[in-house]
Amino acid sequence: GQNIDQPTEMTATEGAIVQINCTYQTSGFNGLFWYQQHAGEAPTFLSYNVLDGLEEKGRFSSFLSRSKGYSYLLLKELQMKDSASYLCAVSDRDDKIIFGKGTRLHILP
Amino acid sequence: TAGITQAPTSQILAAGRSMTLRCTQDMRHNAMYWYRQDLGLGLRLIHYSNTAGTTGKGEVPDGYSVSRANTDDFPLTLASAVPSQTSVYFCASSAQGGGDYNEQFFGPGTRLTVL
């Protein structure tokens, strides 16, 4: 079956660094996505990984290990506006995108 | 550019009634998707379409039907609504059904309450 696991909630301090982990077991693998979703809004795309390694985009980085079925999203220099849910999603062999339940990140001043 | 739009924004529906949620995109994307999002369960795929004229079932298709007569529109129909279909429904599209172009763009969502 398809399974994507990520922590339900995390808390971090403004200015700090936080790592959100995601593990997955899916029918095939065509890439892994991270999305950000603020409360009451639609998800927005953050990053995409299909090869092993680290992809960096400003304050956000995403890492993938296909052999371990593992990814993480790293957020640096946290700002209050980073308070949101972060969704890990995997594109399976049929190119269907399956989402994890999301990690709600709380930023403390 | 409008991107992807959904209608209505919200709706209260009596159980047993039918309803069609509308989704339109102007990005000429090949693939479109319908998700429902429920507290504690995340986004779950209902149906998808990789190109006009084709559709497929997602994780939770029962009680829902879709059609894809053209590239731009992807309506979702509830034939006979039940309270368990109370949810926020998101439509999404992506350029094509694979690879880097699979980045999805989401509509603003439809909040549906079935009483």
Image (cartoon, coloured by chain):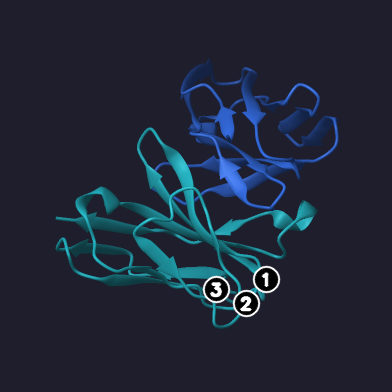
The residue indicated by pointer 2 is B52
Asked whether residue A83 is in view, the answer is yes
> Dot 2 falls on which chain?
B
Q: Earlier in the sequence, mark 2 or mark 1?
A: 1
Residue at which label 1 appears: B30
Q: Is residue B33 visible?
A: no
Say yes or no: labels 2 and 1 on the same chain. Answer: yes
Confirm or deny contact between disc 2 and disc 1 (CB under 8 A): yes
Q: Position of residue A8 (x, y in %)?
A: 46, 23
Q: Which mark is residue B2?
A: 3
Residue B76, how many percent across, how many down? 41, 68
| Measured Cα–Cα span from mark 2 to mark 1 | 7 Å
Q: From the rendered image, report the letter of the chain displayed in cyan.
A: B
Q: Nearer the viewer, residue B98 or B65?
A: B65
Given this view, does label 1 or label 3 mark the residue nearer the observer?
A: 1
Amino acid type at mark 3: Ala
> For the residues marked 1 and 3, what is the alpha-carbon distance in whole angstroms?
17 Å
Residues under numbered marks 3 and 2 in contact, where contact means CB atoms less than 8 Å apart: no
For the point 77% across and 29% down, the residue is A64
Q: CA distance from mark 3 to mark 2?
A: 20 Å
Q: Residue at x 81, y 24 (%)?
A: A67
Query: Are there few (<14), some (14-19), or many (20+) residues within 10 Å of tag 3?
Result: few
